Image (cartoon, rainbow, N blue to C red):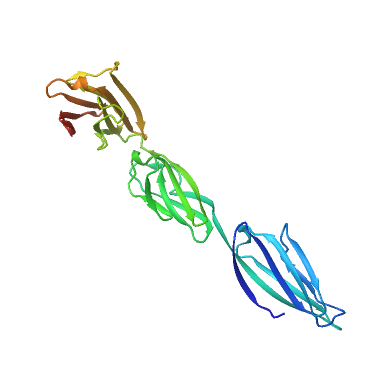
Amino acid sequence: MEEQKQRKKVLEGSSVSLFCSAFSLCTSQPPTLTWSPLQNNSSQEQNQNSSFVSSHLNFTVTRLHHKLSITCTATYQLKNKEMTTENSLTLRVLYAPWKTSISVSPSGSVMWGSSVSLSCSSDGNPAVNYTWFRENGEQIETGPTFSITETNDTHSGLYYCRAQNKHGSQNSSVQLEVQCEYNFIISPQFLTSSHCNSSDNDAVMMVCLCEVRGRPVPKLEWRLNEQPVSQSGSLSIKEESVGVSGLRSILSMHRSHLSMSSPHLQCVSTNQLGSSTLLFNFVGRCSNSDF
């Protein structure tokens, strides 16, 4: 048996049978065949005839076998010495990503206005591709690293990294919390996501969303034709936090509230630095502008 090295690609979970044979130099003392390293839960079949001996090694492949070199050694007992020859095979195991994880740099608290990088790592064969998502499912980046050059409260939340190759995928997540210095205060600022639309479920209902951020978190009030809007049977108001310094208010109302000539709706935001007003004008359809 000549010494040689081979490579074999196999898919994780498949059964592998390795075959090794050696010529018998002396029929009364055939060579001994041994496998190394010997695999757990493996089985061997030995065969012998007048001219050669052979051995089969059978086992199930896992990702732990990737790049493992398995050697079959033939040992001959000669008159005055022992002679060995061997044949090696290196397994190339194809497997889905695993051990996927995210690291944050710099580590520790993420302060408002600072930069931060998220790095994703995983082990898989063939090579792994990376995709980044926000918790709402929005895809934000591809590649092993996602960076934010200047953070604000909208960057707070859960981030997912998906490691993927043609054999499968695995996700990892990290919670990012952007924090403010205690003396960092901001006057109310409306976000461009503020808008009005007809309800998808009821054409006679109007849904208006007002979203603001500030430090401290501002308070929001709705006013219709200069009068404060309060909860009623045909009108509802729902508020929810956005990050660490934002607030979102959703107003649902019957179109009858807009039946007067040139109605206008205001969203008024206030914190200790002052107030700001967003006006929704209803002329055939909704539009908005800042005062």
Q: Position of residue 32 (x, y in %)?
A: 80, 73
- Vertical comparison of 1 with 283: above or below: below
**Identity of the residue drawn at 62% across and 56% down:** 13
Please tell me whether residue 169 is drawn above or below residue 184 in the rendered image.
below
Q: Report the residue at 28% width, 32% height from top.
A: 211
Quarter of the image with the N terminus in it: bottom right
Percent across and percent down for residue 112 are: 35, 41
On screen, residue 59 versus residue 249, left or right, reads right
The quadrant in which residue 8 appears is bottom right
Q: Quadrant of residue 143?
A: bottom left
Residue 125 x/y as whole percent: 53, 60
Judging depth in this view, the residue of 129 and 113 nearest the camera is: 129
Residue found 81% across the figure and 83% down from its top: 25
Q: Quadrant of the C terminus?
A: top left
Specify the farthest residue to the top.
232
- Quadrant of residue 250 within the rendered picture: top left
Q: Is residue 110 visible?
A: yes
Depth order, front residue of 269/109: 269
Any part of residue 216 in sight: no
- Total numbered badges shown on the rendered structure: 0
Up the image or down, 36 lies above or below 178; here it is below
Above or below, 270 relative to 113: above
Please tell me which residue is depicted at 30% across the width and 31% down the height of the picture.
Answer: 200
217 on left or right of 48: left
Residue at the extreme left of the image, as rendered: 261
Task: Say left or right for 76 vs 125.
Answer: right
- Whole-percent x and y of residue 129? 45, 56
